[in-house]
Image (cartoon, rainbow, N blue to C red):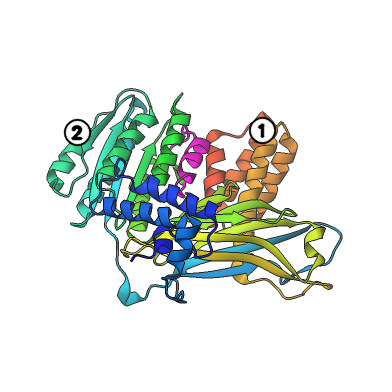
Amino acid sequence: MPDYYALLGIFRDATEEEIKRAYFEAAQRLHPDKNEAPGETEIFLDVQQAYDTLSNSEKRAKYDKTLSPEEQTLSPVLQRIFYSRESLVRLGETQLIYALLEWKAREKDDEVVSPPLNICLVLDNSTSMKGQNIEMVKAAAIHLIRSLRPQDILSVVTFSDRADVIIPASLQVGPRRMETKIRMLIPSGGTEILQGLLAGLNEVRRNLAPERVNHIVLLTDGQTYGDEEECLALANEAESLGIGISGLGVGKDWNDEFLDELTEKTGSSSRYIAEPQEIRTFLEEKFRQLAKVFAENVTLEIQTPPQVELSYIFRLQPNAAHLNFEKKIQLGMILRDQPLGLLLEFQVHPDVVLNDEAELLTGILKFEIPSQSSISQPMRVRVSRQVTDVASLQPPSPTLVHALANLNLYRMQETAQEEAAVGKYNEASRRLQHLATHLLSHGERSMAKTVLLEAENLQKEQNISEEGRKNMKYGTRALLLPAEKGKKS
C-alpha cells in the first residue's frame, strides 16, 4: 500500500485543512484534463484514494495503524538559518531582527543528475524589435538550439498582436530546420504578451513531466496593454502545473512592475537587458541555470504570531527579487551549486518577549526533485530566538552581514523612487547621493555614476529617467547575486 501522506506531500500530523489543501494542489497539477504526461493519470488516481482515506477520520485512524514507525531519513535539502541578533531583549518597545534562511542540495558530486529541459522561448516579434534587437535574438536562439542535449525539448513562440508557434515542442525536430525558422523572423504588429504566453504554455504542457524542468522564458521590449490581468491569471495556472515563467526585458520601454508580478507568481524573476548585445549572454545564463536545477516548485507556507510582523521579504538567490508577503510564498528553485536564500525582516512587539523564547515564524517548505521519481517529504521551518535581560555582544554571521549590506543598497534606491513618486524630490535626491557614496565604497563606480546623474536629474527636472530607474533597480538587485557581482541584471 502506498504512503498516502507522502503522496500528498504532508506530515502525519497534518490537519484536515492541510490535507484538503494538499489534495487540491495535487489535483490541479495531475488532473488528466490538464496533464497528459505518461503515468500521471495513475498517480492522480492514487492521490484521490489518499484523500478519500485521510479526509475521513475513521478511515484515517484505521490506515494509520497499518503504518510502520516514521523513519528519520535525511532530507535531500539542507537548511541553515542565520540571525542578525543572538537573542532578543526584554524591552517595552518594538525590536527589529533579521533572519537569513538558506536551503541547499545535500546531493553528492557522484550523484549529480542534470534534469532534461522542457523549455519554451516566447519572443516578442513586434515592430519595435526591428533592427539590432531581433538580430541579437536570432543569434542567441540559434546558439541555444546548437547547445541542446538529445533529451532536451525546446519550443519557440513569437508574438506581436498574435502568436505563432515557429518551433513546436518535440524531440524530433532537426537543428537545421529549427535554425531556418529562426532566421526567417520578421518583426511586425503590436505587443500582446497574453497571446505569446497562451501559446507558450500550451507548448510546455505537451511534454509536461515531473522529471523535466518545465519553464517559459519570455523576452520583450515593450508594454502589453489591456491584457495584464489575464496574463497574471495565466501565471497562476502555470504555477499550479509546476511551470515556471522567467522574464527578460530589453531596453527601457517594458513594464518592469508587471513583469516582476508575473514572474513572481511562479517563483522566478525578471531581468533587465540594457543593450541588445547582452541578449545572448542573458539567455545563455538562464538556460545554464535551468540545467542546474536540483529542486523546483519550492514553496514556503508560513505563519507568524499575532505580535510579530514580517515586514520585508527578499529572495537573494538564485533569482533575486523583493517578494510580497503571503501565507504561501513561491520561491522557485534550488540549484545544485547554489543555495536558495531568503532574507526576512521582523518587527517584534513587546508582548512576544515576555517568555524565555520568542517564536517568530513557523512554516513548511515543499519542493519537487526532478531526478527522483518519489514525492519529496516537506521540511518543517522554525524561526525563533532566546529572550535575555541583557543584549548579546556576539556579532552576526558574515554571511548575513554581507547580505544585509547589499540589500540596504537595493532598499535605498527603492525608497528614493517611492519618495520621488509622491513629490519628495529633495529627499529622494539626497538619498540617491547617499546611495552613490555607498556604491563607490563597494567599488561599483559605473552604478554610482548612474545614481548621481539621476540625483541631479531629480533636482533639475523633478524626474527619474526610465532608463536610470531600471538601471538602479536591477543594478542594485544584481549585487545580491554573488556569482554576478557588478553585472547589470
Where residue 224 sits, quadrant-wise, is top left
Foreground pick, 124 / 14:
14
Where residue 419 sits, quadrant-wise, is top right
Mark 2 closeness class: few <14, some 14–19, many ≥20 residues within 10 Å: few
482 to 33, vertically: above or below: below
Foreground pick, 364 / 339:
364
Judged from the image, the secondary structure of the residue bearing numbered disc 2 is loop
Residue located beneath label 2 in the image: 184
From the viewer's perspective, tell me whether residue 394 is left or right of residue 223: right
Q: Which quadrant holds the N terminus? A: bottom left
Please, what is the three-letter code of the amino acid marked with disc 1? Ala
448 to 126, vertically: above or below: below
Residue 155 image point, x, y percent: 24, 43
Q: Is residue 465 inside the magenta stretch?
A: no
Residue located beneath label 1 in the image: 421
The answer to whether one can see residue 202 in this image is yes
Whole-angstrom CA distance, mark 2 to mark 1, is 43 Å
Residue 61 image point, x, y percent: 48, 64
From which residue to which does the magenta span run?
251-269
Q: How many discs mark residues in the rendered view?
A: 2
What residue appears at the point 31 percent right and 26 percent down from the top-left corner?
162
Q: Residue furthest right?
A: 92
Whichever of labels 2 and 1 marks the residue nearer the N terminus, that label is: 2
The answer to whether one can see residue 243 in this image is no
Tell me, yes or no, whether the two marked residues, 2 and 1, touch with CB atoms within 8 Å: no
What residue appears at the point 85 percent right and 63 percent down from the top-left corner?
91
From the viewer's perspective, tell me whether residue 471 is left or right of residue 418: left
